[in-house]
Image (tube, helix red, strand yellow):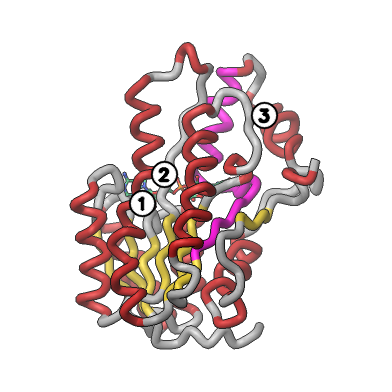
Amino acid sequence: MPDYGLRGQAAVVTGSTSGIGRAMAAALAGEGVDVVLNGFGDAAGIEAARAALAAASGVRVLYHGADMTRPAEIADLVGFAHRELGRLDILLNNAGVQHVAAIEDFPPEKWDQIIAINLTSAFHATRAAIPIMKAQGRGRIVNLASAHGLVASPFKSAYVAAKHGLVGFTKAAALELARSGVTVNAICPGYVRTPLVEAQIADQAKARGIPAERVVEDVILAAQPNKAFVEYPQLAGLLLYLASDMGAATTGAALSVDGGWTAA
Ligand code: NAD
C-alpha cells in the first residue's frame, strides 16, 4: 500500500453508519485520519461501531447525528468537526437513499427526500466546509455519486436526477475552487452490495414483475460488463488517492468505478 500522507488530517463522512460510508470512514481512519461519523441507526449500535473503529485505528472517531435533509444540522455537523478536531481536510458527501418506482407512481415526498439527501445536502456541507478549507489552503471534497450520475435506468428518476445534479455541482464547485488548493471530485460506482442495494432487489422485483432471485443476475449485474459487484477497497483506493497529494491535479472529475458499465 502506498503511504497516502494523510496522518493527522480530519474528515467528515456523511451517511457513515452503513455500507459505503462506513467502509470509507474505516479506510480513512486506517490511514491515520480523525473522522466524524454521521448517519441514522440504533444509538447503541452506532456507539459500538464508533468505539470499535477508534480502538482499531487509534485515531479520534466522533459521531454527529445531523439529518441530511436539514440545512442547519448539516452546517452544525461541519462546524462540529472543525471545532472538535481542530481542522477539516476531507469532506465525503456520501449519504444517500433510493426509491424505485415508475414516474407516474413515484410518491412526490420520496422525490423531495431523494433530492434533499442525495443532492442538496452536498451543497450545504460544501458551503460550510469551503471557508475552513480555503483558510487552510488545502482541502478535498469528494461526492459519492453513482454510475447513475452519468447514465440512467428506468424507475429511478429521482435518484438519476439527483446524481446527475451532484456531478454537475461537483464540476461547478471545482471550477470555483480551482486556485484555492481545494479539489472537488465525484466517485461514480456501479453496484456495491450494501443495504441500499439489498432493499432494491425486492423493489426492482415488484416494479419489473420478476422474481427477486432473477433481479441480481438479469437487472443488477446485467448493467456491469465485468459481472461483479464493486468491492469497498476498490472505492477506498480512489478516495485515498484523491485525498492525497497525488490527487492535487484531479478536480471536477466524475470517476467511474463500475466494471465497465458506463463504457457501453
Ligand atoms: P446505505 O443505505 O448502506 O447507507 C446510507 C447511509 O446514509 C446510512 O448511513 C444512512 O443512515 C445514511 N442516511 C440516509 N438518510 C440520511 C439522512 N437523512 N441523514 C443522514 N444520514 C442519512 O447505502 P450505500 O449503498 O452505502 O450508499 C452510500 C452512497 O453511495 C449513496 O449516496 C448511494 O447513492 C451511493 N451509491 C451506492 C451504490 C451501491 O450500489 N450501493 C452505487 C453507487 C452509488
Between 263 and 205, the residue placed more toward the observer is 263
Q: Quadrant of the C terminus?
A: top right
**Residue drawn at the location 34% of the way across and 34% of the way down:** 113
Marks 2 and 1 sit apart, C-alpha to C-alpha, by 7 Å
Check disc 2 and give the amino acid type: Leu
Q: Measuring 46% from the left and 77% from the top, which residue is drawn there?
A: 181
Residue at the disc numbered 3: 215
Highlighted magenta segment, given as a residue range: 184-207
Q: Nearer the viewer, residue 135 or 80?
A: 135
Q: Give coordinates of residue 133: x percent, y percent.
A: 35, 74
The Cα–Cα distance between marks 3 and 1, rounded to whole angstroms, is 34 Å
- Amino acid found under the numbered disc labelled 1: Phe
The amino acid type of the residue labelled 3 equals: Val
Q: Residues within 10 Å of mark 2 (few under 14, many from 20)?
A: many
Quickly name the residue at label 2. Answer: 119
Q: Secondary structure at mark 1?
A: helix
Residue 123 is tagged as: 1
Q: Which mark is residue 26?
A: none
Relative to 1, is 45 on the left or the right? left
